[in-house]
Image (cartoon, rainbow, N blue to C red):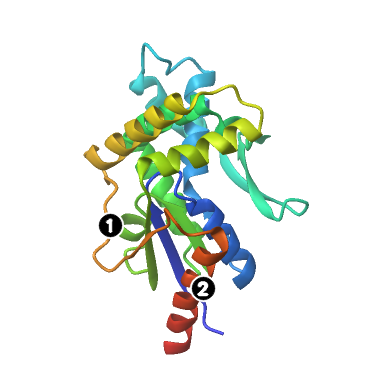
Amino acid sequence: MKKITIAIDGFSSTGKSTLAKQLAKHLGYVYVDTGAMYRAIALFAMQNGYINSELFDKEKLIASLPSIKLQFKFNSDLGFAEMYLNDTNVEKEIRTIEVSSFVSKVAEISEVRAKLVEQQKEMGKDKGVVMDGRDIGTVVFPDAELKIFMTASAATRAQRRYDELTEKGDDVSFEEVLHNVEERDYIDTHRDNSPLVRAEDAIEIDNSYLSREEQFDVVLGLVNEIIEAN
């Protein structure tokens, strides 16, 4: 069966990664979480004192980019690949609200985006890949056979993120999470380099009132239509 490239873009906390994992597992495709890559660089910047609530030394981060090694390593127990930063598993660390508060600022830097887009293009050169992020259908894979753009209200997305964090034991408030979601939306859509926009040929899915199963069925139907047509 012919393999295709599936690009999933959209706002934060719309469930892009969940959908991408489901599709990759069902289709036997490679899954690439580009958000994890940007989060790992944000974590690196935090660990090295390049960014905090009061400062952001972009030049030091840019100078350090050649020393940053990112890898996805498959975890058979979990059924998906985890993010490694310089050979250390950082999958848990990159999912915190603190990293979330800095990741969009890090992703604004053109040198960071250039480094990661190059790696992402290489990961998907043989097709059979599901990749999610902010600019997959517009920059990384503009020729992808299927492009999905996911959206939902800020309040809906904040509630999902809040539930996810509290289930992990994180001490956060809904207001804090909502502010983070709205701030990331603004930065993602207003940055100069590869802002978050819907590709002209992307299919928009508002999943405010869709379950994960309903969403998966809708998109899998689109995938099958494209594969059968080719």
In the image: residue 187, left or right of residue 173: left
- Which residue is rendered at x = 51% and y = 28% of the image? 97
- Image height of 31 relative to 49, above or below: below
In the rendered structure, which disc, 2 or 1, sits on the residue that comes first in sequence? 1
| SS of the residue under disc 1 | loop
The disc at residue 198 is: 1
Give the residue at mark 2: 220
| SS of the residue under disc 2 | helix
The residue at the far front in this view is 209
In the image: residue 123, left or right of residue 55: right
Q: How far separated are the C-alphas under marks 2 and 1?
A: 20 Å
Q: Nearer the viewer, residue 48 or 99?
A: 99
- Which residue is rendered at x = 38% and y = 63% of the image? 148
Q: Nearer the viewer, residue 106 or 61?
A: 106
Residue 44, percent across and down? 52, 26
Residue 45, percent across and down? 47, 23
Residue type indicated by callout 2: Leu
On the question of residue 230 being in view, the answer is no
In the image: residue 203, left or right of residue 119: left
Q: Nearer the viewer, residue 158 or 5?
A: 158
Number of marks in the image? 2
Q: Quadrant of the image for the C terminus? A: bottom left
Residue 213, percent across and down? 57, 64
Residue type indicated by callout 1: Arg
Q: Quadrant of the image for the N terminus? A: bottom right
